[in-house]
Image (cartoon, rainbow, N blue to C red):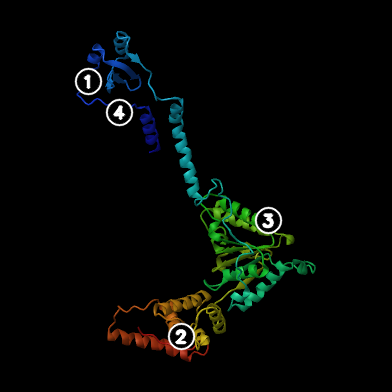
Amino acid sequence: MLAIVVQWVMRSGSEGPKVSYSGPAPSFTNDLQANKVRTVVPNVQSQEMRVTLADGTQYSVTYVDPQSLDTLLAEHPDVAVEPKKGGSSWWGSALTFLLPFILIIGFWIFIMNQMQGGGSKVMSFGKSRARKVSPDAPKVTFRDVAGVDEAVEELQEIKEFLENPKKFQQLGARIPKGVLLYGPPGTGKTLLARAVAGEAGVPFFSISGSDFVEMFVGVGASRVRDLFEQAKQHSPCIIFVDEIDAVGRHRGAGLGGGHDEREQTLNQLLVEMDGFEMKDNIILIAATNRPDILDPALLRPGRFDRQIVVDRPDRAGRKKILEVHTRGKPIMKGVDVDALAAQTPGFTGADLANLVNEAALLAARHGRKVIDMVELEEGIMRVIAGPEKKSRLISEKEKAITAYHEMGHAMVGHFMPTTDPVHKISVV
């Protein structure tokens, strides 16, 4: 398309004014014999000639034999023969020669930019994609974390080491280089890592394990090196790798063997963790839902020394989480947060946050100014079973069968001493 446009511009620049002759096909020879021709402008490339008559009329004719044309014009010396104006110049020829190369280079740059996610640097494959959160950004603190008191207590030491490392170094203590947070999704692993950085007031680098691995071998290892180099420049700091199982699973399980890109990335991560020094003051915090598939070399002492379980909260933990998420929201007086915690066994912190948000949306939908217990209880059902399906009708027989089935669950839950109490039985 670009080549066509350039050729059109060159051609249009070389063309003269529009022909003002409107009669039938003119006879150049007759005009020449009648001494009507004033000037002619021949074009050797296209074998066309623009003719200007004495009265100003212009038209173009095509000639086949240049020698015959020269002989004919020699017989009429009064006719001015002008050179072709606006013809192809040296820059036009050079542009025609260079245009294919320009198109190829432009296409290659476009492909490179697409492969690296639209980045501005063509050769920045090996650059880390970690997102840096500066200490000046709005902070997340341990006050924003609830329901995981044991994990918070374990991470307090990390915060104290980043704040005052000499306190530990004078006693010869070695703070853990890495902390592995594992547990079900939505239990607050990422929030805990950000809370440590917020409490200590240090930079926080956040990246996902899948961001290391690419289709090109060696890119992941280069990104690991670049990430730790950035961290050393901003020391003390925290590096948080979410879903580390994407890059840290057992080696040898894939088809690529030792040449697999993921394994090379994991090897480089192990090398960088071994290269930590006490003066670096860098803490690596990783999160995963599946610690059982991680490589044993990653979990050995000296790398991820401390492994912290972040499990689903119990009733007291759920109550604290609900208090955090209802803070600052217009909750009606008399709403029993403890009763809500009792009705939400098995909920994670993310589920409880979604519950409060659903209740706020329902209150706005109903035109209320405050969030009532009715919306909160309906929010529980929306989180568990989704929106109410009013158009789905079931027969009386199906209702009876479902009622017997659900009653069986309720009776078993009631008589088991270690289960949560039954609060509601839903048939439809």
**Foreground label between 3 and 2:** 2
Q: Disc 3, disc 1: CB below 8 Å?
A: no
* Dot placed on the residue nearer the N-terminal end, 1 or 2: 1
Residue 405 disc label: none
Residue 26 disc label: 1
Using the rendered image of the protein, determine whether residue 182 is visible from the camera's viewpoint.
no
Using the rendered image of the protein, determine whether residue 123 is visible from the camera's viewpoint.
yes
> Where's residue 173, x and y in %?
76, 68
Horizontal relation, residue 360 to residue 315: left or right: left
Mark 1, residues whose alpha carbon is within 10 Å: few (<14), some, or many (≥20)?
A: few
Mark 2, residues whose alpha carbon is within 10 Å: few (<14), some, or many (≥20)?
A: some
Q: Considering depth in this image, is 45 or 267 the residue closer to the camera?
A: 45
> Where's residue 58, x and y in %?
28, 23
List the residue tagged with mark 4: 18
- Mark 3–mark 2 Cα distance, whole angstroms, equals 51 Å
Q: Please tell me whether mark 4 sits on a helix, a strand or a loop.
A: loop
Type of residue at label 2?
Met
Q: Considering depth in this image, is 304 or 369 the residue closer to the camera?
A: 369
Among the 4 quarters of the image, the one containing residue 81? top left
* Dot placed on the residue nearer the N-terminal end, 3 or 2: 3
Can you say whether 130 is above or below 79 in the image? Answer: below
Among the 4 quarters of the image, the one containing residue 387? bottom left
Type of residue at label 3?
Gln
- Mark 3–mark 1 Cα distance, whole angstroms, equals 82 Å
- Mark 1–mark 2 Cα distance, whole angstroms, equals 96 Å
* Dot placed on the residue nearer the N-terminal end, 3 or 1: 1
Name which residue lies at 50% across and 52% down.
Answer: 117
* Dot placed on the residue nearer the N-terminal end, 4 or 3: 4
> Where's residue 277, x and y in %?
72, 59
Horizontal relation, residue 165 to residue 347: left or right: right
Image quarter of the C terminus:
bottom left
List the residue tagged with mark 3: 233
